[in-house]
Image (cartoon, rainbow, N blue to C red):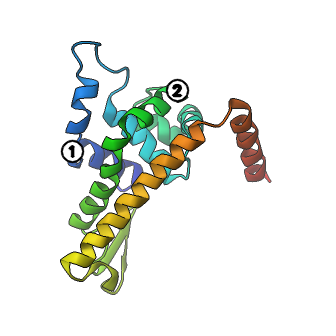
């Protein structure tokens, strides 16, 4: 639905991100195409990250049970191993996209400047001193964003290395806390 985070995510992935880094992986004449389009996998993963899900198993579970994930994915149901494999094989292509999303949000005037917008709600704010400065300062901030992107991918991959029993136990524990 227009005005939602999910709508903005789909729009950015489909219309603004440079996904050419996935072409060789997805359009491979020697071994055939990948089972799931990279744009759909990115939407699922980025939506998972936005909801604090940094594990392929957790993202796959949300994909099965959460209507927002179903909608964003077009009801495509990748197994957690497909999500983990995508992150493991394509991490070098995924990491720069986080920085690219920040740049797109800045171009769309969603961050900084004198207005901040989330899900259609516009709030006045003072100009952010943090995002103004010299090119060197902005370069350092970009490098910081790139390091953060790398850390989240590494964290995702480390979570994927955990055993099935540990993840299941953790998911049950998280669910019981939410129910209380």
Q: Earlier in the sequence, mark 2 or mark 1?
A: 1
Q: Quadrant of the C terminus?
A: bottom right
Q: Which residue, given by chain and number where applicable, does mark 1 sit on?
A: 18
Question: Residue 82 location, x and y as percent?
Answer: 47, 26
Q: Residue at x 30, y 76 (%)?
A: 112
Number of other residues with Cα within 10 Å of mark 1, as a class: few under 14, some 14 to 19, many 20 or more: some
**Front residue of 151 and 71:** 151
Q: Quadrant of residue 107?
A: bottom left
Q: Which residue, given by chain and number where applicable, does mark 2 sit on?
A: 81
Secondary element type, mark 2 = helix
- Is 28 left, or right, of 144 in this rendering? left
Q: Is residue 120 visible?
A: no
Question: Residue 172 location, x and y as percent?
Answer: 75, 40
**Front residue of 29 and 50:** 29
Secondary element type, mark 1 = loop
Height in image: 90 above or below 109?
above
Question: Residue 61 location, x and y as percent?
Answer: 59, 34
Question: Residue 140 location, x and y as percent?
Answer: 30, 72
Q: Residue at x 77, y 45 (%)?
A: 173
Q: Which mark is residue 94?
A: none
């Amino acid at each position: 639905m227009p005005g939602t985070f999910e709508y903005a995510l789909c729009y950015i992935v489909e219309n603004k991100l440079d996904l050419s880094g996935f072409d060789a992986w997805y359009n491979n004449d020697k071994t055939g195409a990948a089972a799931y389009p990279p744009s759909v996998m990115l939407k699922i993963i980025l939506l998972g990250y936005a909801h604090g899900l940094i594990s392929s198993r957790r993202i796959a579970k949300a994909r099965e049970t959460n209507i927002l994930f179903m909608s964003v994915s077009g009801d495509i149901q990748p197994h957690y191993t497909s999500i983990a494999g995508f992150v493991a094989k394509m991490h070098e292509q995924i990491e720069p996209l986080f920085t690219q999303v920040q740049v797109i949000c800045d171009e769309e005037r969603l961050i900084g400047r004198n207005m901040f917008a989330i899900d259609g709600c516009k709030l006045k704010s003072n100009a952010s001193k943090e995002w103004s400065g010299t090119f060197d300062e902005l370069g350092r901030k970009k490098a910081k964003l790139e390091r953060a992107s790398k850390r989240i991918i590494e964290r995702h991959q480390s979570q994927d290395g955990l055993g099935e029993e540990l993840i299941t136990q953790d998911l049950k524990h998280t669910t019981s806390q939410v129910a209380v």
